[in-house]
Image (cartoon, rainbow, N blue to C red):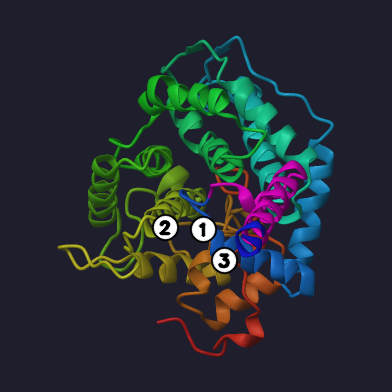
Amino acid sequence: MKQICAKVCVLFAALLTVASHAEAGDATAVTSGRVLLRAERITELKQAVTNKTEPTYAAWLKVKQAADEGLARKPAVPAVWHVPGFYGNKEGHIRAKEGLMNDANTAYTLALAYQITGDDAYGAAAAKFILAWTQLKELKQGDDSKLCFSYHFPAMVFAADLIRGSRHFDPEGEKAFSAFLEEKALPMNTMSSNNNWGNWGLVLFSSIAAYQNNAKRLAEAEERWKKLLDQQVGEDGSLTHEIGRNGGRSGMWYSHFSLFPQTIAAEVLRTQGRDLYDYKSPKGRTLRMAYEKLASWSANPESFARWKGDPKELHGRDYFSYFEILYSRWPSREVGQLLVKNRPLTARHSLPWLTFKYGVAIESRNEVREAR
């Protein structure tokens, strides 16, 4: 009888311990990690922050600073989502989309901070932004509306995944968000397009499929990823549909703007057990081919022959934050130098804080190896 009582007391104490952790906002109790950052990776990031391991720690300080600033922000949900075309109305385009850009990136930043620190203030604030956007009633699809939604909303999905199952994202809130994904967000994807629109639409589609754990949609995303790779990458590794933009002056920018989302989608699919990094298409195209070609131009912009003017006038040649993901697989001297010079790296579209989540110490890699 005494042994039974002792076992009951131990079990009761354990339950109290679990309850106290949950009450204190212990982020380890969150059932997240389905979409992009698995629980084991989050644990590694926490350890890197605790140990002040670089480049993670310096990047974390930027994340935390932005998260603290985000605590004071309020959601900016429009009455109607409509984004004018960039080339017809640049100012209107920027003004219309910046609310979602800021809100989605803030939500993701706050959710990251919540996972690393367990601080309830971050989790509650992230949920505030996510749930505010579930109240958006009308989404128009004309002009650049679908494109901008495709490249800014995924950060909101990544954020929701990081606070999923927490006290801040209760079943009612998650139900509202899931309904918004299915009924409003999913139809906004531009996956069927053959240029960078298709890549960004694939990010939206694949992130929603991963959040839903929808095997059929994930298989569809995988097939679309493969087809885009085969269609877009030329024999020399260049993104043939983008390199001539604006007489070549915007060729590097649009190449990054296509390869970046293709990389994000690959990472989402890898997290679902669908690793495409070494996939070779029927034409012999690979992600590595495109990465190494664009990396070479990024390191040596004067070698980008599609632009005949001053290399300094090339648009967006340094939008390569996603190289953090690819460098860890395929290190090279030239990319290592780019990363060291520009860290910590982040991005405005879909996936901020790339150095924090994916950066590796350059000196620990074979950075002297030339890109192949």
For marks 1 and 3, the one nearer the N-term is 1
Asked which secondary structure carries label 2, the reply is helix
Name the spot of residue 240 as percent of width and height, x first. 32, 54
* Residue denoted by label 2: 271
Q: Which amino acid type corresponds to the residue marked 3 in the rendered image?
A: Glu
Q: Are marks 2 and 1 in contact (CB under 8 Å)?
A: yes
Badge number at residue 324: 3
* Residue 62, horizontal then vertical, whole percent: 79, 55
The prevailing secondary structure element of the residues shown in magenta is: helix
**Position above or below: 199 against 357:** above
Which of these two is toward me, 124 or 145? 124
Q: Is residue 270 left or right of residue 137?
A: left
Q: Which of marks 2 and 3 is in front?
A: 2
Q: In this view, does 241 lie above or below 127?
A: below
Which of the 4 quarters of the picture holds residue 90? top right
Name above or below for residue 26 compared with residue 310: above
Q: What element carries label 1?
A: loop
Q: Is residue 62 left or right of residue 183?
A: right
The circle drawn on residue 236 is none
Question: Marks 1 and 3: which is nearer the front?
Answer: 1
Q: Which image quadrant is residue 167 in?
A: top right
Pointer 2 or 3: first along the chain: 2
Which is in the foreground here, disc 2 or disc 1? Answer: 1
Query: Residue 73: x and y, percent?
Result: 80, 29
Instruction: In this rendered view, identify the residue nearer to me: 287 or 6.
Output: 6
To which residue does mark 1 refer? Answer: 38
Q: What stretch is highlighted in magenta?
A: 6-32
- In the shown orientation, is residue 277 left or right of residue 114? left
How crowded pointer 1 is (Cα within 10 Å; few <14, some 14-19, many 20+) is rated as some
Q: Are marks 1 and 3 in contact (CB under 8 Å)?
A: no
- On whether residue 74 falls in the magenta region, the answer is no
Q: Distance between the residues labelled 1 and 3?
A: 18 Å
